[in-house]
Amino acid sequence: MNEKTRRGFWKNQLFFTGPTLLIFFMVMIVPFLYGIYLTFFEWDGISSSKPFVGLDNYAEVIRSGSFWGSMWLTIKYVAACVVLINGIGFLLACLVVSGIRFQSFFRASFFTPALIGGLVLGFLWQFLFNHFFVSIGKTYGIGLFSKTWLGDETLAFWALVVVTVWHYAGYMMVIFIAGLMNIPNEILEASKIDGAGKLKQLTGIILPLMVPSFIVTVFLSLQRSFMVYDVNYSLTAGGPYGSTVLVSMHVYEKAFRSYDYGVGQAEAFVLFFTVALITLLQVYFSKKKEVEA
Amino acid sequence: MRFRPLLLHGLQYAILMVLFLLFMFPFGLLLLNSFKTNGEIMESVTSWPTAFNLDNFRDSFIEMNYMRSFLNSAVITFCSVAIILILSAMTAYWFVRSKTRLNNALFLIIVASMIIPFQSIMIPLVSIYGNKLGWMIEAAKQTLIFFYIGFGTPLAVFIYHGFIKSIPIELEQAAIIDGCTSKQTFFKIVLPLLKSTSVTIAILHILWIWNDFLMPLIVLQNTGKRNYTLPLAIQVFRDFYSTDFAKFLPGLLMTILPVIMIYILSQRYIIQGVVQGAVK
């Protein structure tokens, strides 16, 4: 390669990738590395003194009861959300795709909550839980709704789950519908001729062929519910009595309310590794279940 | 025998109707109560409003500084998405067509970075761009757009990369023989082919940025209300002890409305965008 074209190559390299890489490194990579550095210091974010504390921040995170409380609560929340979002999303997809009339209307309606931000949805449902459900409960004497869910520690947790499921079930439905449409009709017809019932078709053909869709939807719902902050903030604000502080909120409070950047960042990394590990395992193990049509 | 399918059909419709009501009643109640006074709301959430009270909307509009917040949201979303699209398309194109070891490694880093959640770098971002450099204070909105670009490019580069791989190289070779430079080839030949992929990426990113809360909260919160986006502005009505629902609910409705209107106009594209984005 002569001098001129080599220079031309680097000019193009710079032109096509330079701006993207500059911003990408400044926003993602440098802060990520700087974050690792921060975890070894005690810092309130303002003062000029930043004493080196070694692994003390990690030790504090590991000892912290409130952090693991949040983590455990988040894991329960994620488990409930992933199961319900995917279960209901799949049910909706099956109901909508079966060729009935108005199906695009139903599909569009179920998808609507997915368009709206968690913050707004949380505020809306706070109003519903505090006023609508309570009034229904009182009028019809339903014990479950006689008091607001947001005032009870267990029920407030389930309120978060309900809102999250309502938020994302339609989103996953859309992905499932695309998967269901891709199942070749001949296979279903052939199985019918062979005498397979609806249930047999579902477990023997449809579900195995839907594994790729499930990989995507489980991944998305895992990631989104693990990282949730907005619904948590607007619906329960961590209450009652700090019983529903999910782990994102815990990190936020540690850093920006208690001004403990070092410990906050160490918590953020523990969260990052947990989520990375779980999602990688999920994708790895479910890829093994994939089959060819 | 013809009776059974009919019955099944009926059952299916019944289940769908119930689910439809479960999914839609929050919006219905929001609409209904937005026109009521505080007294009416407290008396009964399900009653019809006595007079369609538009004063609520006016008060709410003024108090949350709606026009300003709406424009902030719109400008931030538009600028971020536009820049993400053009920069990512260029980068992805170069990564596909110039497979040097450096470029392969860079692409790998970019794809791997998608697993980094905002929460795990928000503290460093604040310490670098807030405390040290002061960008978040001097140019808060620009800094927010800058963050969105950094965060949004990995997914966009990934999706573009997947699509550009499938474009036959003969098209470009013909252009190069005709004397086009790499830049001309990209802008004249390749870019026009990326239209539908760009729509997919734009939809995913618009949904994310328009609705995002935590990042604007951290960047804009302390810079004054004139910088607020809609999700931040809606908080003025939040008060734990006595929320003023007569203003809060119209505010929520007005925050949701633009999205719903765009959805009604371009439903097919949005749903398609979500599916395309998920499959890739």
Image (tube, helix red, strand yellow):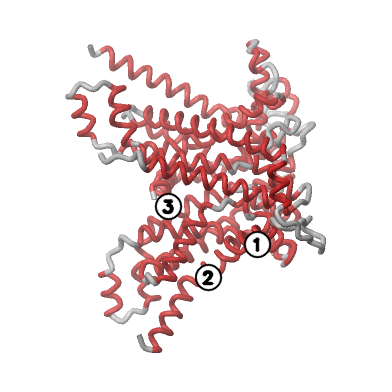
Q: Does any portion of residue B234 appear in the rendered image? A: no
Closest to the camera, between mark 3 and mark 2, is 2
C-alpha span from label 2 to label 1: 21 Å
Q: Earlier in the sequence, mark 2 or mark 1?
A: 2
Alpha-carbon span between mark 3 and mark 2: 22 Å
Check disc 3 and give the amino acid type: Thr
The quadrant of the picture occupied by the N terminus of chain A is bottom left
Look at the numbered disc 2 and give the secondary structure of its residue: helix
* Nearer-the-camera pick, A98 or A225: A225
Q: Are marks 1 and 3 on the same chain?
A: no
The residue at which mark 2 appears reads as: A19
Q: Is residue A277 above or below residue A28?
A: above
Which numbered disc, 2 or 1, marks the residue closer to the eye? Answer: 1
Residue position marked by numbered label 1 in the rendering? A34
The residue at 74%/28% (across/down) is B38
**In this rendering, position of residue A233 left or right of residue B240:** left
Residue B176 against residue A251 in the figure, above or below: below
Residue B183 found in image quarter = bottom left
Label 3 environment density (alpha carbons within 10 Å; few <14, some 14–19, many ≥20): many
Q: Amino acid at mark 2?
A: Pro
Asked whether, in this view, residue A269 is left or right of residue B238, the answer is: left
Cβ atoms under marks 3 and 2 closer than 8 Å? no
Q: Residue at x 72, y 61 (%)?
A: B130
x and y percent of residue A94 in the render? 37, 29
Q: Could you classify mark 1 by the number of other residues whose Cα lies within 10 Å: few (under 14), some (14-19), or many (20 or more)?
A: some
Which residue appears at 72% of the width and 54% of the height?
A262
Name the spot of residue A125 as percent of width and height, x first.
Answer: 63, 31
Q: Chain of mark 2?
A: A
The kind of secondary structure element at disc 3 is helix
Q: Position of residue B229 (x, y in %)?
A: 65, 51
